Every structure is written in C-alpha cells, then in structure tokens.
Image (cartoon, grey):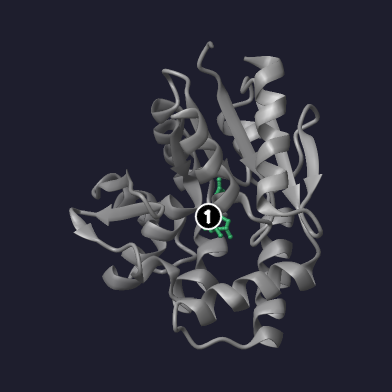
Amino acid sequence: MKKINIAIDGPAGAGKSTVAKIVADRLTYLYIDTGAMYRALTYLAISSGVNPEDGVKLKELLDASSIQLEVTEKGTDVYVNNKIVTEDIRSSEVTNLVSIIASHREIRETMVQLQQGMAEQGGAVMDGRDIGTHVLPDAEVKIFLTASVEERARRRHEENLAKGRESDLYILQQEIQRRDELDMNREVAPLEKAKDAIEVNTTSISIDGVVERILEIVKERA
Ligand code: DC
C-alpha cells in the first residue's frame, strides 16, 4: 500500500495525540506531535526569559535552538538543545502560555517548514491545529476531531489524576475554553477545519471506534 500523509487537527483534548499515535503504530507510520514543538519553544522562552509577546526574539531563539521529537512506546520524547523536556512541556505554566507563543507569524513559518520536512517522504500521521489547512494541504487523509468542552476537560482531569498531578476540573474547563478562543481567533493559521477534512466528534465514541474509522478512510485512499 502506498505511504500517504494523514493530518489530524482539532481543539485541545479532542483525543488527537492518543488517536494519532495508535493510527501511526497500526500503519507503521511516523507520528509527529506538532503541539509538542510549540510547547518546546514555550519552555525555552520561559527558561531564557524571552517575552512571549516578542515574535522577533522568539524567532531568534528558535533559530538558535534545536527541537527534536523521538517516538517512544508511550508517546513522544521531546528534547530541546539535547536536554529531555518531555514532562516539563506539559506543565500548566507552559500550557497557559503556548497559545500566545504559537500566535506569532515569524515562528509559525519556521515550524511549518520543519514539519513539512518531516513528512516529505509520506507515511506521517501529524497532529496539530493547522496541519490540514497549512502544513500538509495535500495530505491524502484529513481528519478534524472535536468533542464538547466538558468532555475534553474531563479527559484532561483524568489524565492528570492518573499521572499523579494536581487537577481541578473547573479550572481545566476554563483553560480549555480560553485556549480554544486564542487558537481559533488568531490571525495566522487559526484552528479551523480544512474544507476537505472529515469531522469526527469523539464525545461519545471510544478511542478504538475513532481509530477504526480513520483506518477505514486510509484504506480507501491509500
Ligand atoms: O496539541 P497541544 O495542546 O499540545 O498544542 C499546544 C498549543 O500549540 C495549542 O494551544 C496551539 C498550538 N499549536 C498550534 O498553534 N499549531 C499546531 N500545529 C499545534 C499546536
């Protein structure tokens, strides 16, 4: 079967990374978590004291740094300048700043180029917000995952508790809503469904159900 590219977009907590990772494993494709790249830059900005509003300084920081993704059994390990930051980039400090960092045109141009390079050979399952619209507009399969805000907050809450992190369901709901607003209303490459994307609402479908649906679509197109 020909190796195609699969774009999976949608808001925070819709299940993108879980689904994308399983689909990639089932097809022996490469899973690329683009949100982790924006999170890595956010981590770098915090630790270097760069103002999150300053797109030019952020671009300089990005150009001077290396961000690497390494696929593991459990997900993706993330390295910045060869230091592992997989856990650090999931902190609430990073989570609450990342949408501001990701809004700058200067840094999105570089990120998109890096991401396009990673999928050049085909055989990539890439998740994010602008994959079907900007990064891989020619992807053979485009999926737009959604779920209600309540359900997405509940999933994050359970994930936090399972990992022994502190968590407050009400605060999570507010943070998710705020992030949705920033991601959907930014000027550059906002979160939106590509015209040719298939929307899958995951509120009441199991992960396995979503994966099977995507694999069927892939079979038809590959
Ligand atoms: O998927 P995530 O929650 O790890 O993404 C973190 C943030 O990065 C998200 O709030 C918006 C931004 N992002 C983006 O702007 N474009 C992408 N392709 C992926 C993520």
Quadrant in which ligand 1 is drawn: bottom right
Give me the residue at 36% from left, 50% from top: 73
Give me the residue at 66% from left, 47% from top: 208
Q: What element carries label 1?
A: loop
Dividing the picture into quadrants, the one containing residue 158 is bottom right
The residue nearer to you, when weighing 185 against 151, is 151
**Above/below status of 43 relative to 184:** below
Image quarter (top left, top right, bottom left or bottom right) of the C terminus: top right
In percent of width and height, residue 55 lies at 46, 55
Residue at the far left in the pictured view: 82
125 sits left or right of 154 in the view: left
In percent of width and height, residue 198 lies at 79, 34
Q: Does the residue labelled 1 lie within 8 Å of ligand 1?
A: yes
Dividing the picture into quadrants, the one containing residue 28 is top left
The residue to which callout 1 is attached is 102
Q: What residue type is labelled 1?
A: Ala
Residue at the far top in the pictured view: 2
